[in-house]
Image (cartoon, rainbow, N blue to C red):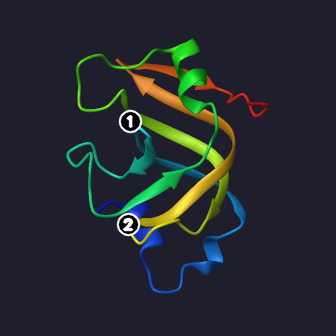
Amino acid sequence: MSKVIDLFSCDDNSDFFNKNAVVSGYLVIRGRECFLVGESRYPFPDSRVEIYCPGLEASLDSVVGGWVGGVASYFDEVTIHGVVGPGTTCRDVASISKISKIALIRDECEYEIIPDVGV
């Protein structure tokens, strides 16, 4: 597991919840799923951080565009600024919402995405 997942996987992680945080990892958008994983080697691990940000894929599409023909429409290294909370399912060790900014790295270029919170 990665540092980001290990951090949220401890027995009492409530100290992290309902606070602004900056979380780094790999963004995965696949079908209806949107989550953060800690390592690029494991795009679909047993533990992950759920991402809740309505309209996120459209915001990303307007800046960088999704991958075509791969296992996911997005699978990129990111740093996300938002509020950390508990995950919805047992698989989701935490969630991040109220996202104010995302820095996405692709092909050695960094893209800044400010999600459209009005969506």
Task: Determine the secondary structure under disc 2.
Answer: loop
Measured as percent of width and height from the top left, residue 48 is found at 39, 58
Residue 33 falls in image quadrant: top left
Which one is in front, 33 or 77? 33
Q: Residue 31 location in percent, x, y? A: 38, 35
Q: Position of residue 78 (x, y in %)?
A: 47, 37
> Mark 1 vs mark 2: which is more N-terminal?
1
The quadrant the C terminus occupies is top right
Left/right of residue 41 with respect to residue 38 in the rendered view: left
Amino acid beneath label 2: Arg
Q: Quadrant of the N terminus?
A: bottom left
Residue 24 position in % (x across, y down): 48, 47
Q: Which residue is tagged 1?
A: 31
Nearer the camera: disc 1 or disc 2: 1
How far is disc 1 from disc 2 in space, using C-alphas?
A: 17 Å
Is residue 82 placed above or below 13 in the rendered structure? above
Of 52 and 112, which appears nearest the observer? Answer: 52
Q: Which residue is mark 2?
A: 91
Determine the image quadrant of residue 21: bottom right
Under mark 1, the amino acid is: Gly
Disc number placed over residue 65 in the picture, else none: none
Residue drawn at x 63%, y 41% is 53
Residue 73, quarter of the rendered image? top left
Question: Which residue is depicted at the point 53% across and 41% down?
Answer: 79
Q: Mark 1: give few (<14), some (14-19) or many (20+) Cα within 10 Å.
A: few
Q: Is residue 76 above or below residue 11?
A: above
Give the residue at the far left of this rendering.
Answer: 41
